[in-house]
Image: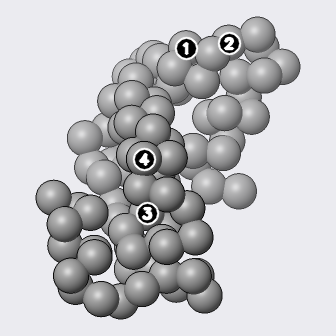
Amino acid sequence: MGGYERVVSHAKPNNFTPIQSGQKVQSVFKELSIEMLGLDPLKNFEGNIGIPLSKRLDTAKEWIELAMAAGTTVIQMPSPFLPLSTRGYGIIIPELQ
């Protein structure tokens, strides 16, 4: 389970929204003088032809809001590796722009 999933799973039993959970993580890190470098990679975003771009953009927006609430400014975008992904630059580059 990555950082994103842990923040979201922390929210449910504590009756927090994911954003509130991210803010709690940031608060605890600040108390301990720990800096969060990255929440988790935004996996399978670009070139994923199995999910419409509009849905992926909605997911990315939520993910970025949560990352900011948790106190990180680093967004990792690993290479796509799903079978329904394309490696075509004509699709990947515009999606990342």
Mark 3 vs 1, N-terminal side: 1
Q: Tell me, yes or no, whether the two marked residues, 3 and 4, touch with CB atoms within 8 Å.
A: no
Residue that appears at 23% across and 62% down: 96
Q: Residue 41: in sight, yes or no?
A: no
Q: Nearer the viewer, mark 1 or mark 4?
A: 4
Q: Mark 4 points at which residue?
A: 54
Q: Name the residue under label 3.
A: 45
Image spot of residue 27 (x, y percent): 45, 17
Amino acid carrying mark 1 in the image: Gln
Q: Mark 1 points at which residue?
A: 20
For label 1, the SS is helix
| Residue 30 image-quadrant placement | top left
Q: Tell me, yes or no, whether the two marked residues, 2 and 1, touch with CB atoms within 8 Å.
A: yes
Mark 4 → mark 2, Cα distance in angstroms: 26 Å
User: Relative to 55, does residue 65 appear above or below in the rendering?
Assistant: above
Q: Tell me, yes or no, whether the two marked residues, 4 and 2, touch with CB atoms within 8 Å.
A: no
Mark 1 → mark 4, Cα distance in angstroms: 25 Å
Mark 1 vs 4, N-terminal side: 1
Q: Nearer the viewer, mark 3 or mark 1?
A: 3
Mark 2 → mark 1, Cα distance in angstroms: 6 Å
Residue that appears at 55% across and 14% down: 20
Mark 3 → mark 2, Cα distance in angstroms: 26 Å
Q: Mark 2 points at which residue?
A: 16
Residue furthest top in the image = 15
